[in-house]
Image (spheres, rainbow, N blue to C red):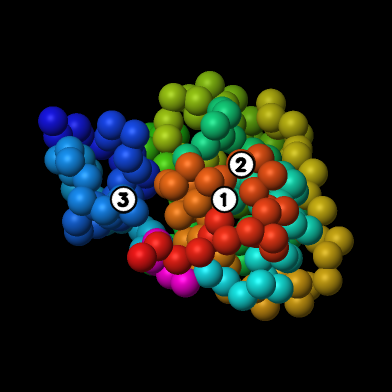
Amino acid sequence: MTQTADCYGVHWTDGIAWLHQGGEPTTLVDKPAQQVQGIAREDRCNHAIPIHATSAAQPHREMLSTVWKDLMFQAMLPVPKTGPGIWYFDVELLYPTLLCKLSSPVFAPIRAMANMTLEQIIDAMGQSNVQPLLLTGVRDRHAQLVERLVAAAPALPRTLILIGKAEMPLSHSFSMLPDLPLQNLILPPWEQLGANILRDYMLGRLTSEGGAGYGASESSSAAT
């Protein structure tokens, strides 16, 4: 039976994960018996995650253990969300911009809050379940809009990350990334690491301690 996916990203059929990002869906299981899921969207997919990429170098996999539990890093992971999926940070845009690479974006998934209506944001939050949407420049005047987004977010597939300083109905989450040496965030191959992480998720190998395991296991080894 063919199921229809309502967004790009990962969808499951009979226990097998399929990645939709334009073109033919991809699975990491050899010769699955069931039919591939269909995709219901007509807009262009904004991620091109190299799911069959080789494993990142050992030092880079070990580096993940230093950032794995950081809330911003968790929010930016290219895997389907498990909670409400809406976050609010007060950080320089540099940090989420670097982590955007985890989902191998075609275009940066970053928009100015002032340039989008509620309807446009809701539509964008339905596009993918493996690439967060970032809205910058949150101001006091956006409080009512943020309140409506907090209510809508749990039913939508895409993680939403808000960046700003103003007091909102949503509390700020803390990130320790600004405390790290900048070279620790600039040098890693984030696209490759993101593909490794997503592959582990699709193969059922990713756990809450997944970051620490990258330096000691072959869970991120390339699929054959």
Q: Nearer the viewer, mark 2 or mark 1?
A: 2
Kind of residue at disc 1:
Leu
SS class, disc 1: loop
Kind of residue at disc 3:
Val
User: Disc 1 or 3, which lies upstream in sequence?
Assistant: 3
Q: Nearer the viewer, mark 1 or mark 3?
A: 3
Report whether 7 appears left or right of 159: left
Residue 181 showing in the rendered view: yes
Neighbour class for label 3 at 10 Å: few (<14), some, many (≥20)? some
Look at the image and give the residue range highlighted in magenta.
Answer: 50-54
Query: Which residue appears at 68% of the width and 54% of the height?
Result: 213
Report whether 30 appears left or right of 175: left
**Residue 136 in picture, x, y percent from top left:** 60, 51
Establish if 216 lies above or below 169: below
The disc label shown at residue 77, or none:
1
The disc label shown at residue 29, or none:
3
Neighbour class for label 2 at 10 Å: few (<14), some, many (≥20)? few
Q: Nearer the viewer, mark 2 or mark 3?
A: 3
**Residue 158 in picture, x, y percent from top left:** 45, 40
Of residues 60 and 91, the one drawn nearer to the viewer in this rendering = 60
The disc label shown at residue 207, or none:
2
Query: Which residue appears at 43% of the width and 46% of the height?
Result: 202
